[in-house]
Image (spheres, rainbow, N blue to C red):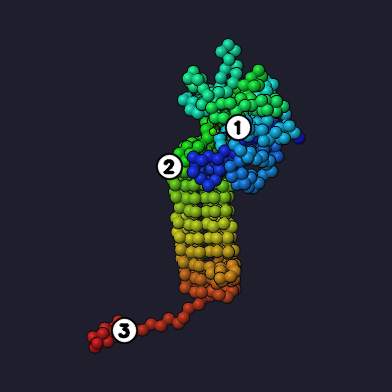
Amino acid sequence: MSNRCCIILAAGDGKRMNSANPKVLMPVLFEPMLGWVLDSVKDAGIEDTNVGVITGSSADKVAEYLAARGKFRTFLQEERKGTGHAVMQAESMLSECCSDILVLCGDAPFMDSGTINAAYELHKQQNSDVTVITANVSPAGSYGRIKRDKNTNLLSAIVEMKDCTPEELAITEVNSGAYWFKSERLLWALPQLRDNNKSGEFYLTDTVGLLAKNASTYMADDSIIVLGANDRRQLRALNDMMTEVINSRHYSEGVDIIGHNVIIGKDVKIGRDTLLMPNTIIRGQTTIGSGCIIGPNTQISDCKIGDNVNFNCVQAFKSKIGDKVKAGPYVHIRPGTTLHNNVKIGDFVEVKNSEIGEGTALAHLTYIGDSSVGKNVNFGCGTVTANYDGLEKHRTIIGDNAFIGCNTNLIAPVEVGESAATAAGSTISKDVPAGALAIERGQLNVKEDWYKNKLRLDKKK
Ligand code: UD1
Ligand code: CA
């Protein structure tokens, strides 16, 4: 049994988002805000099973998202009566599972594991009943204000903006909505909450006043941790800020980004001296090696890419790319594809669910689907694998050093042996043995003096 648990408040509806989805599932860089929070909790070293999420609005959608991610606990808050009321729903977890409990907002994606753990250190060191994570924000907007005792300067209460006096409104130290509590002290304070405030809600922040005798604050290094979004404009701002944060991390790791509109998802890893060019989106579980040039106008999702790869105007999904692969422009690499080292793919080529051997070239206007292709194969312009018979998909197998002539149709299932060739314009519906040449063409029929004869006939008319 671990001594650290976490409750994430995620019951809010977020009406101003004007979405079919609940607010915590609104994405920042393709990942729901709740996902960012869950990752920070995980990075802080708190196990899934010690995390309870308070659901309410679209609870089923949130629960479905959580189930796909791990073994989290959920607590349904049927009526939305405030953040204190939300935490009360997880009372059973508080009493059974831990001594220290972290409370976070599910809509604050910038909260990071470093801040969480630094606040925890302080919490333990001071042996506090509650440690509030605060930040300096000016103007402080609608955040709860951190009120301090005039004499001791110690935390005395958190006052919500709506309930502030003009003097309190001027305070710039704000509540991030994240706290470490001693769970037994939180259990003691929760039943004492009242909803006699401007919002008529049970404020979690009032527990801080109740525990003020033994409360402390941890001020975050960067006030970005408090940010959340209530509408699409703010969500857009979070996306822009997160892009800055992520791209900046890649600069530190030796990656160059030139121009604009380079958007990188949170889990993407990129090697040193790789250059990213404008209008490039890289997302999912993608890793890219070093010395690559990616973009412009490229989208990559869930791919593993080697070193010194060059992608210009490429769309690649769920595929493995070796070293020194060159692709583009206008290339579509669909799921299940493996391109070995030194593969060359030129304009208007689509590859799907296929393995392409080292040094093979697919230079122009070609579709390769459900195929296993050997090394150093040359595909002429306009090659097509006919992999689908209307009912089932079939495989095409091509051996090393084969030569596929321009405008060849390969009717799968079919095999072209090692060093075999197909003549330009052939439709290959039978296996071609190693070393053979397959020609499938009608006899060429040349009519001499056709034009002259045509003119003569026309004149007669
Ligand atoms: C809260 C804090 C405020 C702090 C701010 C930081 C209170 C009373 N105020 O204000 O001091 O500066 O966060 O962002 O806590 N939620 C529920 N159930 C509810 C109400 C809210 O699950 O009944 C969830 C929301 O989905 C959200 C989080 O709690 O994820 C915060 O709620 P919100 O209404 O946004 O609180 P704020 O008014 O922003
Ligand atoms: Ca909020």
User: Quick check: 333 above or below 284?
Assistant: below
> Which x, y percent locates residue 260?
43, 42
Between 5 and 184, the residue placed more toward the observer is: 184
> Which x, y percent locates residue 28?
52, 41
Q: Which residue is mark 1?
A: 83
Q: Marks 3 and 1: in contact by CB < 8 Å?
A: no
Whether disc 3's CB lies below 8 Å from ligand 1 is answered no
- Looking at the rendered structure, the kind of residue marked 3 is Asp
Q: Which residue is mark 3?
A: 449
Could you tell me which secondary element the residue under label 3 belongs to? Answer: loop
Q: Marks 2 and 3: in contact by CB < 8 Å?
A: no
Between 153 and 9, the residue placed more toward the observer is: 9
Q: Which residue is mark 2?
A: 260
User: Which of the two labelled residues, at mark 3 and mark 2, occupies the earlier sequence position?
Assistant: 2
Mark 1: few, some, or many residues within 10 Å (few <14, many ≥20)? many
Q: Residue at x 45, y 82 (%)?
A: 443
Could you tell me which secondary element the residue under label 2 belongs to? Answer: loop
Q: Quadrant of ligand 2?
A: top right
- Looking at the rendered structure, the kind of residue marked 1 is Thr
User: Quick check: 182 above or below 62?
Assistant: above
